[in-house]
Image (tube, rainbow, N blue to C red):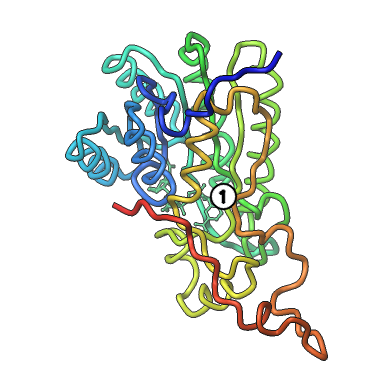
């Protein structure tokens, strides 16, 4: 049966009235997701290891007329999680979406990185995601449009030179997401993961020198880094009822990087289409929503 209804979900957001817990919301893609969710009429609990940053983001949302509170938590700590979920329920009485963008990136070579560092990476990136989801599940099950969105990485699909435990932990997170999706579809809870490419956030700026980031941008088919807002668009879409039939998916948001086997320009001799391919400027973002 076809529907003649206008495709107006982008104008008339179905996020209005929903509540999201955004973990890692104190910076980067989590911050952008919290702001986008709130800007579309949702209520947001901004949670982060750095409680001060979570409070800053919540304050900014409220100062723009949005609805948000903040909480400090370590995703690897079950008691912290329980307290944050309780705070969410106390304030909003329900939970419709869990967005988890938190991660520990601790590059250490596989050959001699300490096993404690390896474990801590899995504790935050994998155990933390499971603990969070389990704590939220009883409340998500009561929502008519429940969703969990995790944030993985291309490193979880392809590995990442000198990334140590990071890539393996993100691979586990991607599979954990699919497993949750299969087990919890019966409860009406959708679970997806977004895999960013190289995104211009405090995390990437702390991990990679600016000149190296600039060189890396040239190897991305779209020839630029992504913005946190561009990834937040995907995250918030997957968290919203607009994505009602999508579950168990890993969605890459990477300017084409994951599909690009050879760095560009590819150095054909003689050069083909040099004007378009080798001298092409980066493809600009269609819009920005920077605060
Ligand atoms: N930036 C990139 O290029 C890139 C690429 C691929 C994947 N990612 C992934 O995207 C996600 C977001 O990254 P970002 O670049 O926005 O990073 P970010 O550093 O800007 O934000 C991450 C936030 O998570 C919080 N956090 C860290 N450990 C936590 C813990 N134990 N408990 C609660 N909060 C914790 C941090 O305090 C920080 O505010 C991460 O999962 C990261 O692995 C980032």
**Residue displayed at 74% across by 81% down:** 273
> Residue 213 or 67: which is nearer the viewer?
67
| Residue farthest along the right direction in this orientation | 269
Compared to residue 90, the image places residue 31 above or below, namely below
Image side of residue 206 versus residue 1, left or right: left
- Residue 103, position as x, y percentages in the image: 50, 46
Pick the front one: 187 or 10: 10
Residue at 51%, 39% in the rendered image: 235
Farthest residue toward the bottom? 270
Q: Indicate the secondary structure of the residue bearing disc 1.
A: helix
Q: Quadrant of the N terminus?
A: top right
Task: Give the quadrant of residue 33.
Answer: top left
Ligand 1 closer than 8 Å to label 1 CB: no
Depth check, front residue: 116 or 180: 180
Image position, residue 119 (x, y; %): 59, 45
- For residue 228, above or below residue 112: above
Q: Which residue is mark 1?
A: 116
Q: Residue at x 59, y 57 (%)?
A: 197
Q: Is residue 78 above or below residue 268?
A: above
Q: Position of residue 22 (x, y in %)?
A: 40, 34
């Amino acid at each position: 049966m076809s529907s003649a209804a206008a495709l107006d979900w982008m104008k008339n957001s179905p996020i209005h009235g929903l509540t999201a817990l955004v973990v890692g919301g104190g910076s980067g893609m989590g911050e952008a997701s919290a702001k986008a969710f709130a800007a579309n009429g949702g209520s947001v609990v901004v949670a982060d290891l750095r409680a001060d940053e979570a409070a800053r983001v919540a304050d900014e949302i409220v100062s723009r007329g949005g609805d948000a509170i903040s909480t400090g938590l370590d995703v690897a700590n079950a008691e912290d999680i329980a307290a944050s979920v309780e705070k969410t329920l106390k304030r909003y009485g329900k939970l419709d979406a869990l967005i988890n963008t938190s991660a520990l990136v601790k590059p250490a070579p596989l050959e001699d990185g300490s096993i404690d560092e390896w474990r801590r990476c899995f504790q935050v990136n994998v155990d933390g995601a499971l603990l969070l989801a389990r704590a939220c599940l009883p409340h998500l099950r009561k929502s008519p449009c429940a969703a969990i969105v995790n944030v993985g990485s291309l490193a979880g699909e392809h590995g990442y030179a000198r990334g140590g435990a990071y890539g393996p932990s993100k691979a586990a997170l991607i599979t954990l997401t699919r497993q949750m999706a299969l087990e919890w579809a019966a409860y009406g809870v959708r679970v997806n993961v977004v895999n960013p490419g190289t995104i211009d956030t405090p995390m990437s700026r702390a991990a990679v020198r600016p000149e190296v980031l600039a060189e890396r941008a040239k190897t991305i088919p779209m020839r630029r880094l992504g913005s946190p807002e561009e990834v937040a668009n995907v995250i918030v879409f997957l968290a919203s009822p607009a994505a009602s039939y999508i579950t168990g998916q890993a969605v890459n948001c990477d300017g084409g990087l994951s599909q690009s086997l050879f760095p560009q320009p590819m150095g054909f001799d003689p050069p083909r289409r040099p004007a378009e391919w080798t001298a092409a400027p980066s493809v600009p973002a269609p819009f920005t929503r920077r605060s």
